[in-house]
Amino acid sequence: MCPKTQPRRRGLRIAVWSLATVLVVAAGLVGVVLWQNSYDMDEQRVSIRHGGHTLNGVLATPKDGREHHGLVVYVHGDGPIDATHDDGYRPMWEANAKAGYASLSWDKPGVAGAPGNWLDQSMDDRADEAAAAIAWARARPDIDGDRIGLWGASQAGWVLPKIAAKTPVRFVIAVSPAINWLQQGRYHLLAELRADGASSARTKAAIAKSDTTRRLLARHATFEEYVEATRGDTDGMTVDRWSFISKNYSADATQDLRALRGIPVLLTLAGHDINVDTADTEHVYRKVLDAGGALTVKRYPHATHSLLKQSIEQSGVKTTLTALFSPRSLFANGFLDDQRQFLKDPGQFLKDPGRGSNSMG
């Protein structure tokens, strides 16, 4: 036997075992990802007719054997969002299912192949769209028409009360909603500048540009006028986006919130929100809704605007890994459980002193 044969065989065995170990570990990781991203609910694609076009939706229902479920209707925030919000809604849908509720969401117009363009919509258009979806749901034998409520985040704060004014809803879950469009925009601008450690000169220039934009909006300026006024420094603004802002920049939820009086409302606010002035939001909600005793405010001190844990969201790597291996852990502690408990009995949730309107989460 050649003296080199035995070392070669040993090296081959080591290589084979190393490859086998890598494959086993990889298979295990894939299994963990599949398991963690499997949810205890059933999902089906649905089509909802509205205004001469189709809303492409997803209906997620509990696996509890019942034939009649309450329903949470999802109203998106800003941006091109699909029905699942890139799977980000699924942990919430599962929490809803554990409380005996189905969940309904749909692709924004122009997203994921849906017809239309969401940037053509006003907040009233979005409310009409949601009201049509609720009417569709009420006609289904598997949905309890008396137990339909709303869930909405961020920009949806201007849409939720408009929906409630159009059609009866059992409850509302408002996540990081703003009150006034222009005030929210200015708050966000200054918060971002502070977070970036911007100099006073940069801050002054940014405010001046924002003031110019406001003046242009007030006089219904065209996109071309905006481009000229900013000397081409449009910060990614497009003609469609300019049209969208022009339709909606005067939005203010203060008066519309009166439509939610007497309806159980769960207002969830984050401790690290650079998008929305949560103190202002809470003040207005309490001023308008507290008299009816149907408001619960929950604060999550370590959460961001999207109610994700700040420690995770501030790192792209952590966000990706958590989304793969433990997606339910993305959210602030207690966020999913609080919504599940609220759905089980909105009235009792309000009465519970540990979860009531003065709770800080």
Image: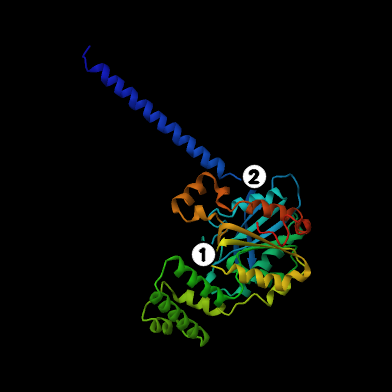
Q: Is residue 166 visible?
A: no
Task: Tell me, for residue 231, which label it has, or none.
Answer: none
Q: Which amino acid does label 2 sit on?
A: Asp
Instruction: Indicate the secondary structure of the residue bearing disc 2.
Output: loop
Instruction: In this rendered view, identify the residue nearer to me: 142 or 309.
Output: 309
Local crowd size for mark 1, using a 10 Å CA cut-off: few (<14), some (14–19), many (≥20): some
For the residues bearing labels 1 and 2, Cβ distance under 8 angstroms? no
Which residue is tagged 1?
Answer: 80
Q: What residue type is labelled 1?
A: Pro
Would residue 304 be found to the left or right of residue 97 on screen? Answer: left
Which mark is first along the chain, 2 or 1?
Answer: 2
Quadrant housing residue 252: bottom right
Would residue 33 be found to the left or right of residue 102 on screen? Answer: left
Return the x and y of residue 132 as percentages of the image width and height: 68, 67
Report the quarter where the C terminus lies: bottom right
Which residue is tagged 2?
Answer: 40
Residue shown at the point (50%, 78%) measured from the top left: 243
Residue shown at the point (71%, 69%) measured from the top left: 164
Return the x and y of residue 57 as percentages of the image width and height: 61, 59
Q: Which residue lies furthest to the bottom in this view?
A: 219
